[in-house]
Amino acid sequence: MAETEEKTQGTQGRVKINQNNLYQQETFTDLRIGTIYRFTPVKPNGEMDKGRKTIFAGNTQIMTQQGPFPVQFPIEANNLQQAITAFPEALDEMLKTLAEEAREIQRQEESRIIVPSAPAGEGLIHLK
């Protein structure tokens, strides 16, 4: 019990919600291809914050040899209709970015210098 209390008390004062950056999240989906999230800025009292821009994000899955791979990406739009229209292009841009990052990781792995370890028996201390 004391350990649980200690863990709970340990987060007090360090973990706080940023009241100046609150968003209400709404979800729109066609139940087939993907999901669009609309993040509407709100004030701490729950009223819409008209001083900040609404944010849209897309979410879908692509099939890979290892199975489904979730992809989330920002969508530049001012309203839901624009977000729906921009969904395919925003997804394509994210897939290009992911492919470039994967190629860069592969290039870095291939260019690593592999240093062979010492032959068996060398570097060991033998007591006689």
Image: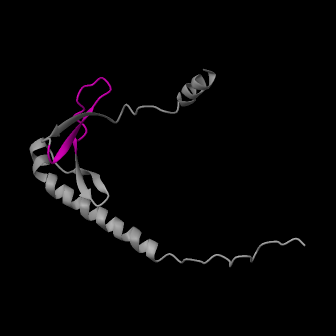
Residue 95 in the image: above or below residue 79: below
- Residue 34: x percent and y percent? 18, 46
Magenta run includes residue 25: no
Left or right of 77? Residue 16 is right
Furthest toward the top, the residue is: 1
- Residue 30: x percent and y percent? 12, 42
Magenta run includes residue 44: yes
- Residue 51: x percent and y percent? 24, 37
Q: How many marks?
A: 0
Left or right of 17? Residue 13 is right
Q: Quadrant of the C terminus?
A: bottom right
The residue at the point 11 percent across, 47 percent down is 84
Q: How is the image coloured?
A: one colour
Residue 5 in the image: above or below residue 66: above
Furthest toward the front, the residue is: 128
The residue at the point 30 percent across, 23 percent down is 45
- Residue 67: x percent and y percent? 29, 55
Query: What's drawn in magenta, residue-wise?
Result: 32-57
Furthest toward the right, the residue is: 128
The residue at the point 22 percent across, 30 percent down is 48
Q: Nearer the viewer, residue 21 or 71?
A: 71
Occupied quadrant, residue 55 = top left
Left or right of 24? Residue 7 is right
Q: Quadrant of the N terminus?
A: top right
